[in-house]
Image (cartoon, rainbow, N blue to C red):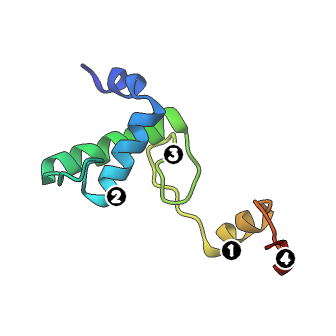
Amino acid sequence: MNIDALVKAMTPEVYERLRQAAETGKWPDGTLLSEKQREDTMHAVMLYQAKVMGSEEHMTVNANGEIVHKSRAQLKQEMSQQQDIARFTQDDF
């Protein structure tokens, strides 16, 4: 199977599991990844980010295959533009 077919066959759920495994070094059932598995998993995650997601989030791989680095000011600006999920007062409880 070629790389493009592999990435296109990945579902978002598979991507999330692989991403989590690469981050933690463990499969969802708790089994440790071997060094080869971790390396292959990271490659699959980066390919998915570049080819499917076209992500522009900090520390992801963009469509050009480059890692996206954002300055502290850029990250702060993005965070300030996000809407609050919820706000509570002390009387709400």
Label 3, on which residue? 62
Label 4, on which residue? 89
Q: Which amino acid, by three-letter code, is at mark 3?
A: Asn
Query: Mark 1 Cα within 10 Å, few/some/many (few <14, many 20+)?
Result: few
Label 1, on which residue? 73
Q: Which amino acid, by three-letter code, is at mark 2?
A: Glu
Left or right position of 45 against 49: left
How far, Cα to Cα, is label 3 from label 1?
20 Å
- Which label sits in the foreground, 3 or 4? 4
- Which label sits in the foreground, 2 or 4? 4
Q: Earlier in the sequence, mark 2 or mark 1?
A: 2
Q: Which amino acid, by three-letter code, is at mark 4?
A: Thr
How far, Cα to Cα, is label 2 from label 4?
36 Å
Q: Residue at x 45, y 50 (%)?
A: 66
Callouts 2 and 4 close, C-beta under 8 Å: no
Left or right position of 9 against 77: left
Residue lying at the far front of the rendered structure: 93
Q: Which amino acid, by three-letter code, is at mark 1?
A: Ala
Question: Could you say whether the residue bearing mark 2 is in a helix, strand or loop?
Answer: helix
Question: Could you say whether the residue bearing mark 3 is in a helix, strand or loop?
Answer: loop
- Which label sits in the foreground, 2 or 1? 2
Kindly identify which numbered label has been placed on residue 23.
2
Q: Is 5 situated above or below 93?
A: above
